[in-house]
């Protein structure tokens, strides 16, 4: 089952794709920018769905299949609107993916920084050697 939720997160409109298979959930976040029209969202899904990069799966995601009373659903929606912070499994998954990418980026940049330091040290070492030799 695939679910797309489009919501406004100041200053952009964001779409969250959720793919639920056998109790496992995978998510992908897409930034639309300006408010997308229905036909633009539909066109985006048709053209770009297979290009989306979903996060790693979260095992045992709960899937509700029970039919609820419409008034109860409306009350729950209003209750969720009033809540602040991360509310859904999809958003939690996106946050985990962002954290994982941030850690990878930090590791990569620290390795590059260390490599640059090593090169500078080698250059200084070479320069000292040349000074001792005398020209």
Image (spheres, rainbow, N blue to C red):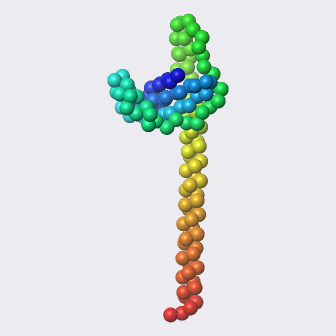
Please report the residue visible at 57 percent of the width from the left and 52 percent of the height from the top: 106
Question: Where residue 102 appears, x then y in whole percent?
Answer: 56, 46
Query: Would you place residue 123 above or below residue 101 in this image?
Result: below
Where does the image place residue 11, in percent across and percent down from the top left? Answer: 41, 34
Number of disc labels: 0
List x then y, in percent, for residue 24: 61, 27
Residue 26: quarter of image = top right
| Residue plotted at (52% across, 11% down) | 74
Compared across the picture, whether 23 is left or right of 36 comes to right
Q: Is residue 125 above or below residue 80?
A: below
Q: Residue at x 52, y 22 (%)?
A: 1
Name the foreground residue: 3 vs 30: 3
In this rendered view, identify the residue nearer to me: 81 or 92.
Answer: 92
Q: Residue furthest bottom?
A: 135
The answer to whether residue 87 shows anywhere in this view is: no
Of 81 and 6, nearer the camera is 6
Vertical side of 107 occupied by 74: above or below: above
Residue at image point 54% right, 87% down: 130
Look at the image and tell me whether residue 106 can be seen. yes
Coordinates of residue 93 in the picture (x, y in percent): 58, 33
**Image quadrant in which you'd find residue 126:** bottom right
Does residue 68 lie above or below 17 as drawn? Answer: above
């Amino acid at each position: 089952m695939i679910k797309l939720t489009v919501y406004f997160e100041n200053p952009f409109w964001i779409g969250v794709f959720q793919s639920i298979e056998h109790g496992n959930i995978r998510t992908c976040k897409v930034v639309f920018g300006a408010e997308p029209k229905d036909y633009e969202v539909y066109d985006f899904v048709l053209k770009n769905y297979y290009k989306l990069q979903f996060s790693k799966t979260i095992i045992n995601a709960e899937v509700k299949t029970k039919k609820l009373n419409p008034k109860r659903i409306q009350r729950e929606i209003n209750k969720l609107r009033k809540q602040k912070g991360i509310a859904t499994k999809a958003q939690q998954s996106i946050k985990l993916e962002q954290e994982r990418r941030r850690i990878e980026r930090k590791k990569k940049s620290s390795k590059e920084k260390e490599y640059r330091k090593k090169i500078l040290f080698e250059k200084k070492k070479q320069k000292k050697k040349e000074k001792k030799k005398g020209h």
